Image (cartoon, rainbow, N blue to C red):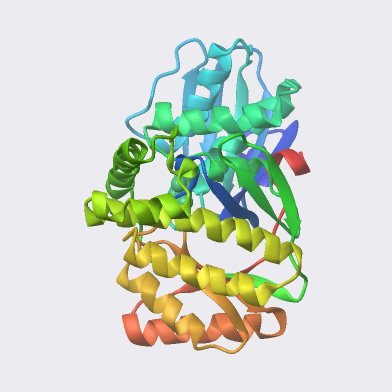
Amino acid sequence: MIEQKFRQIFGSSPEVVVRAPGRVNLIGEHTDYNDGFVLPAAIDRAITYAGRRRAHRHVRAYSNDFQASVEFDLDDIQKAGENTWSNFLRGVSKFLEADGHRLVGADIAFGGDVPREAGLSSSAAVEVGATAFWNKLLGLGLDPVYVVKLSRRTENEFVGVPCGIMDQFISALGRRDHALFLDCRDLTYRHVPLRADVKIVVCNSGVKRALAQSEYEVRLKQCREAVEKIAAGTGRTVKSLRDVQPSDIEAAKSTMDNLLWRRAHHVVSENERTLEAVEVLQGGNVERFGELMNQSHESLRDDYEVSSKELDTLVVLARQQRGILGARMTGAGFGGCTVNLVRADAAESFAQAVADGYEKVVGLKSETYVCQASDGALISA
Ligand code: GLA
């Protein structure tokens, strides 16, 4: 599809094609920027890059999703005020050059089917896709974790969104039929197999994540503040909420403002839930895994306060259906999607029933996707 578009726009075949998937997080929400644990899976929706070298240092890029083109000079890469979709590619190119990787001009077409602003990390897919594209086109032999870090740096420093590392990590290093357990402190990871008799079903609330960025920044600050307060109380080195034990958080209850305490409590309890979730998934106990997903949602709703009326409705509807094991909001929150673990034989009817129920209650259409965990950009490349 993108290859064909490339031929149509640039008049020849691409030299390389690279595919970077979106993601859904199964559990471990708002823990990555607290040095904690996450368990996402790459989904079978992706951004594909097709491209070919040119003789000089100009990049021509076509976005199939925006049906628009830009051109920029590798010797003078600036952030664009218009066609802001091109900033991911510009930022990645700028930082690669700054790190001493000499790029060459290229014709590039890209696009895909990861819904935008739905909490499925289309931005991370665009960034990781761009980095992986240059890596493959020029045979740079980049270390996979370097690809992840450079893609995240683009989002933080060039695009200006203060995200953690989860989304770029899974887009690069996800594996088919597996979730990825990542320790966001030391970036060690392992793939955990998903059972064939359960499916991951994503339900899109259709509500864009309007408040997500400003509230995300507020949560970041609150977590830092909570760390300072708790560190003062424990007398141990507490660098992040990762270092806070469940017993510390209980002990800190009377010493802190309740709102700050609830924020910290979510993160500390979510890390515990994620560790248990990995263990039970490995042992095949999907029932317990589902319970932990349910608890994660309650914690995000009540302690961290990043859910929404629509997400809560999707979760309530999900839990009424046959075959459901667990349901929770996924991603930053304030709109976007829920993730559901459903018995495989009930997955299609589940998706339909939730979509119908949601339309009746909320008056909005919910797109639902029965997902297949997929390979990341660096796995399939
Ligand atoms: C967004 C960010 C991630 C992570 C999640 C919440 O997706 O990009 O880094 O913080 O929110 O878990």
Residue furthest left in the image? 257
85 shown above or below 94: below
Asked if residue 325 is positioned above or below residue 200 in the image, the reply reads below
Question: How many numbered marks appear?
Answer: 0
Is residue 43 visible in the rendered structure shown here?
Answer: yes
Q: Quadrant of residue 19?
A: top right
Image-quadrant location for residue 145: top right
Residue 155 spot, x, y in % from top left:
45, 34
The residue under the point 44% across, 54% down is 247
Position in image of residue 6 (x %, y %): 64, 39
Give the left or right position of residue 316, taking residue 362 as reference: right
State the quadrant of the C terminus.
top right
Report the residue at 49% width, 28% height from top: 153
Q: Residue at x 25, y 49 (%)?
A: 255
Left or right relative to 269: residue 374 = right
Residue 141 x %, y %: 75, 23
Q: Is residue 331 visible?
A: no
* In this rendering, position of residue 238 left or right of residue 210: right
Establish if 14 lies above or below 218.
above
Q: As displayed, is residue 59 above or below residue 260?
A: above
Picture coordinates of residue 242, whole percent (x, y): 49, 43
Seen from the viewer's position, the closer of residues 100 and 103 is 100
* Quarter location, residue 343: bottom right
Which residue sits at x=27%, y=45%? 218
